[in-house]
Image (cartoon, helix red, strand yellow):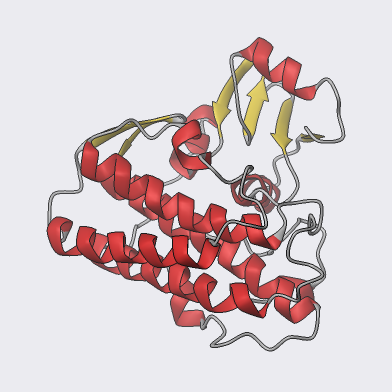
Amino acid sequence: MISGAISVYSAPGCSSCLRVKEFLNTRGIAFASVNVVSDSGAMDRLAGFGARSVPVIERDGAFVYAQSNADIVEFLGLDEAAEQMLSPEVLAERLDIMLRATLRYLPQVPSHLLHDRYRNFFAPHNLAHHIFRVGEAFIEADRDALDYSYELMMRGTHGAGPADDIAAYGRRVISQLDTWRVQAIPGDFTAPVTTYYGCQSRHELLERTAWHTAQHTRQMQSVLTDNGVAPDEPLRPDDLNGLPLPRNVWSEDETPAESEA
């Protein structure tokens, strides 16, 4: 039995926000859902706790950034074993698959949808930038021994405009990943990394990068299928198996058809 009322602070389209809600729901853990976009005072309340980004689980004034299932388990005192992660080699391959899929899907997005917010989330143009930036931020942090800050991860995404060539940017990030894989794998992925949501191992941060980009790539694919466009090489189940993804693509109240990848 978990004591104390639990609140989950989240935002529409946020991959980790969706995952933490599914995590709690599947375990029958009750929580109050706080949408920081529609609740004008939510970010101020988060700041009062000491939090700067979502998702956050708050209980009795204490909080945890809900980016890591292991951190959620510890914060709530759940009796659960740690989930088995895919190997760094496989995770790097999955990351490559997602970046290349996004590069294929971006030119397929209907032009009238490209620069408008979609499902109250990023415009597809900016979503593609975000996918590439998440991959690049991991490479920079790992290669250059940087802290993995929220600002590092989000750099450039909100400001990406119609004149920015996101496809060219994506090709550069894929090239960086190719180089990083040659240099870093195989290697020791147990070393700690300072992130904005706590200390993680290199392996854990790589896993988060892989599933984070995978979830947003599912959303890019959904933009196409929602609008009658057949994706160029849709994601296969084998591209997603073993990643700690949420079941749904956009929100916890999707129909089964909407949640299929």
**Up/down of 232 relative to 21, above or below:** below
Side (left or right) of 218 relative to 187: right
| Residue at 61% in and 52% down | 15
Picture quarter with the N terminus: top right
Nearer to the camera, 259 or 31? 259
Residue 167 appears in view? yes
Which image quadrant is residue 215 in? Answer: bottom right
| Residue at 37% in and 69% down | 96
Nearer to the camera, 197 or 19? 197
**Up/down of 168 relative to 194, above or below:** below
Side (left or right) of 249 relative to 211: right
| Residue at 44% in and 74% down | 100
Which image quadrant is residue 128 in? Answer: bottom right
Nearer to the camera, 94 or 229? 229
Side (left or right) of 47 relative to 217: right
Image coords of residue 224 (percent x, y): 71, 78
Residue 78 appears in view? no
Image coords of residue 143 (percent x, y): 22, 45
Side (left or right) of 238 relative to 164: left
Which image quadrant is residue 137 in? Answer: top left
Image coords of residue 84 (percent x, y): 35, 57
